[in-house]
Image (cartoon, rainbow, N blue to C red):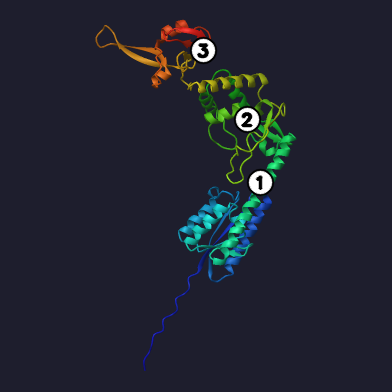
Amino acid sequence: MRIRKVEAAAQKAKLQVAVYCRVSTKRTDQEDSLEAQQIAYLDYIKANPDWVFAGLYSDSRSGLNAGKREGFMRMIADACAGKINLILCKSISRFSRNIVECQRYTEMLRSKNVAVVFEKEHIRTDAPASRLIFSLMCAIAQDESRSISENMKTANRHRVEAGICLPHKNQILGYSVEDGKLVPNQDAWIILHIFSRYAEGAGMMQICRELNEKGARRQRVEKPFTHQIIRCILGNESYVGDKRLQKQAPKDFLTKRPDPIVPYATHYLTDHHEAIVSRALWNAVQERLKQEENARKEGVRRQGNSHELYGRIICGGCGAPYMRRTVTSHCAVPGEKVHSKIWCCKGKITGSGCKNPNIREDVLLRRVAGGGKAIINREGEVVAMM
């Protein structure tokens, strides 16, 4: 009698199934919806004996830019690494509202033998017959997002025209929102210090050091002050009690950046709320900011240790500012050197071809008196004061 060995059938590998959920805001009702989606899909996976749970990925951000959704990008990376075979998602609009991104990522997943199942549309991306329908649904999802964006822009334009400022737009350092209005809080001293010191002539970096030494901190983050933060505060009209609505063009619904070709109108509200700085202090600061901006256009970029004459000595030949330099010369005593300061045209230094001469600092100080700017001619003489 011949005995034949029968090999056991290879056990079929279970599919690694992941779930992706997304809501567009962090409101409580949206968070409840997200939790409900997660529970429903987990029960659905457990009920299928051929599936094994591979992870739950979620986001609470807009579906137009995948790069800003951490959960989504982590899911794509895990799928490409072979940790996921199937992805369950409620609808195409939850997966992505950007038609280009939606098709790109589904194609990427398909190349890795990873399918996406969209419950609402009854579409599975690895089914050949679903490609045309899937493309149409992607276009519909993107158009729905465009429509929502247009409605929000219209509502915002009407609010601006009516002079209405939303409460969440008022969350700035130095103020609290009480009954929808801005009220100075315990951090108002920081704002007053910044404006007062800048009006007195202190540099922005110097103000940063002073605030950091006093232990002052920015709103919502425990980080030190920076030059950029100080500049932003000094130009914010909210601190003088005013409010400018619609400061920049409406954002494009895909890129989420201001669209420069879209026409828009700003509205300036005077004495909108209680001020932290006086109108006189505000005007003094704005005048100095304007002077600094004009100086930068002329090539003057002051630093904390810049000489007091820097930006005030202008070349009469090319219009560039004069720069302070140290020169070394030998004296009659062997081995000894003399260091002296001179001022020379910035254009001449950078090779613009300017021929205006250098001028010694001691000579310059004798010729310059009072404030304003001095114009130097080709003979090294101060020919005008501005």
Precedes in sequence: disc 1 or disc 3: 1
**Label annotation for residue 187:** 2
Q: Which residue is mark 1?
A: 149
Precedes in sequence: disc 2 or disc 1: 1
Q: Residue 184: percent from the left, percent from the top? A: 68, 29
Asked whether 369 or 359 is in front, the reply is 359
Residues at circles 2 and 3 in contact by the CB criterion of under 8 Å: no
Q: Amino acid at mark 2?
A: Asp
Q: Which residue shows up at 51% across the image and 53% down it?
A: 74
Q: Taking the image as drawn, is residue 83 in sight?
A: no
Q: Which residue shows up at 47% across the image and 58% down it?
A: 80
**Element marked by disc 2:** loop
Which label lies toward us, 2 or 3?
A: 3
- For label 2, the crowd category at 10 Å Cα-Cα, with few meaning under 14, some 14 to 19 and many 20 or more, is some
Q: Which residue is mark 3?
A: 373
Q: Is residue 313 left or right of residue 24?
A: left
